[in-house]
Image: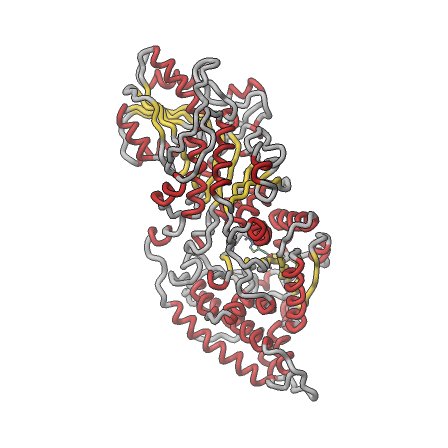
Amino acid sequence: MAVEADPLEEYLLAALRALTPPSAPIPVPAEAELLWRAQVDSRQTDYAARWLQQHGRSFYTIGSAGHESNAALALALRVDDPALLHYRSGGFYLARAALAGVDGVEDVLRGVVAAAEEPIAGGRHKVFGRYELAILPMTSTIASHLPRAVGMAFAIDRAVRLGVTGSWPADAIVLCSFGDASLNHATAQAALNTAASSAFQRLPLPLLLVCEDNGLGISVPSPSGWVEQVLRSRAPIRYEQADGAEPASALASSRELAEWVRSERKPAVLHLRTVRYLSHGGADAEIAYRSPRAIRADYARDPLLGTARWLVSSGRFSGPELAADYVAARERVRGQALRAAELPQLESAEEVMSPLAPRRSWAVAEKASATQFEDATPLTLARAIEAGLAAVLEKYPEALLFGEDVAVKGGVYGVTRGLHARFGAARVFDTLLDETSILGLALGAAVSGLLPIPEIQYLAYLHNAEDQLRGEAATMQFFSQGRYRNGMVVRIAGYGYQLGFGGHFHNDDAVAVLRDIPGLVVASPARPDDAASMLATCAAAARVDGSVCVFLEPIAMYHVRDLYDDGDDGWVQPLTGAHVPIGSARTYHNGEDLTIVTWANGLHMSLRVARRLALRGVVARVVDLRWLAPLPVEDVLREARETGRVLVVDETRRSGGVSEGVLAALVDAGFDGQMARVASKDSFVPLGDAARLVLVSEDEIEAAALRLVGYS
Ligand SMILES: Cc1ncc(C[n+]2csc(CCOP(=O)(O)OP(=O)(O)O)c2C)c(N)n1
């Protein structure tokens, strides 16, 4: 493969060769050489990636060229300070790898060619990451890693305060880098706000943010001065600037700031001014939106040139020597690239998916079974969930419970009411009113070794923050081959039937957004005893397998006591502690006329309808799914075959609702009996009694069941 000429390289080599030795040499620290090595190798890795791509040997990739002064930050930190990197932080990656004795070029090239042996994502994504370097893999969604970074910084000191073993050293700091255009993203703003608010409240938050500002977001320039103004406006987050074209001073600023963050346990942001070379990435042709003159003007701000000047000022290196070193690095890295291109990629769906969602059900059962519920009296769903949470907080000293209003008030519906007083403010606490930050805190705490149990006050308010679950939480094991995990239990109050309360947003039943996230566990209990046991299962799965669990609570059932008649206490139960495995349904009655498949509010309604049907001589069995993901397909199929007729009672919407999944699973499994469903309408839920017009009702269920059995 030919090596093409490149104007940036030509400029750099000429400038290097023209560097003149100093009349009075100044000693420079040994780190300057480390910096040079990481920067040059990063640049050559970018060229090699481009070269491989031009020859069809690699995939879409974004380079770090122009940003290599970020290597200074790696030298200013310790190798065990966890880092979440911008996709242009290649210099940082290689510098940290060198400090740890790892061949970082090899790692990055393996990512570029999607080699199955790449150290973090194993060919699933081109990311910077390696467990041994405490560098977590990032997704492509810009800024989505910032809330996690805030959560990690929070978790370091919180773990110490709780006396539990976290994933990072007690005096570690978190590094999180991002681009200038990304700063405008709501997710970035959420994280900055939460970091500032935490510092304002004097919570320890050892977080070093780095805005790598090249002045462009793909083709769009950041307005001059805007980034600085935004970053400066986030007091008490400390703001400092550094010029990436002058790596010596960038290193000094990085070091000073990192030490300040470490000792003060406060957040700071380094505004690192960089340039961007070789276009945005992939097929982007910069020439379409920037003048050749502007492109060329940036050549003089090359961070490699800045480091070369520094090295030459020591008198130990000449410009031509550094130019020769640069050329030699090109040959070396291209040789490595060619070898990487020969490496095998992932070869089967099983291989691709193996780290997605491990399920060691026997180990989960063992751990969950050891959860002790204290209350032996019959409880409502709300009290059972509280008892379940208390048992989990008791069993896992690393468990944290947080959300809006969960602490002193005990939640909007009083579900968590005794827990703040009992377990203290370090473990049960209120957060800012920001779902993105709540989930970000959970992401950071979980990957730091804690067991977060965040609450989203209503299902409708998950949606503005949902990417933190989808893009961040659910992908972590996938993109790190399980080396990093973020097991958590996200409690979400939801569904309809609170007829007097709130209209759509307090009665939202949109679960499609959860059901299609690969690997996510979605629990949705209806009965008190199941709820407590399922909480114990979710907590155990989060610890044993790193499972990301959503615990979807039917608000309208929280305080229900009766099943059939007023005062029958048919919906209060003592907690048995029986283990409920993930993906296992529960069957009521053994009727042979039809099988009603349902869950949550639908279970209460269906059991009542089953009694009405029995009065007409139609005997049903009722299956409570309990888990919406993974669906208990085997249980449903078995119960369906017992009767040959299935009615799915789906309180979520007809489109995108759970019944679509249940019916499809039956068809996939070859079930050839009769199938029907009742579902809520494709509508938002209105206020008051009008809600009944769109939500599934007992009358509808009964009519559909009678139709299915041919009752006339
Ligand atoms: C949420 C989201 N929206 C859009 C994109 C597509 N995208 C990728 S990079 C980018 C520009 C980011 O610019 P900046 O933050 O300045 O970083 P730079 O690439 O300049 O280093 C965009 C719009 C994305 N990855 N994520």
Q: Where is residue 665, by image quadrant?
A: top left
Q: Is residue 143 rendered to the left or right of residue 395? A: right
Q: Residue 499 in the image: x percent, y percent? A: 55, 21
Which residue does the image show at 57% across and 75% down from the upper left? 36
Residue sitting nearer the eye, 556 or 392: 392
Which residue does the image show at 38% across and 19% down from the upper left? 704
Residue 118 lies, with reference to residue 546, above or below; the image says below
Residue sitting nearer the eye, 50 or 376: 376
Q: Quadrant of the C terminus?
A: top left
Which residue does the image show at 63% across and 53% down from the upper left? 205
Residue sitting nearer the eye, 182 or 208: 208
Q: Residue 427 in the image: x percent, y percent? A: 57, 43
Q: Quadrant of the N terminus?
A: bottom left
Which residue does the image show at 57% across and 34% down from the upper left? 457
Residue 711 lies, with reference to residue 460, above or below; the image says above
Q: Where is residue 32, by image quadrant?
A: bottom right
Residue situated furthest bottom in the rendering: 23
Residue 97 lies, with reference to residue 380, above or below; the image says below
Q: Is residue 387 rendered to the left or right of residue 345? A: right
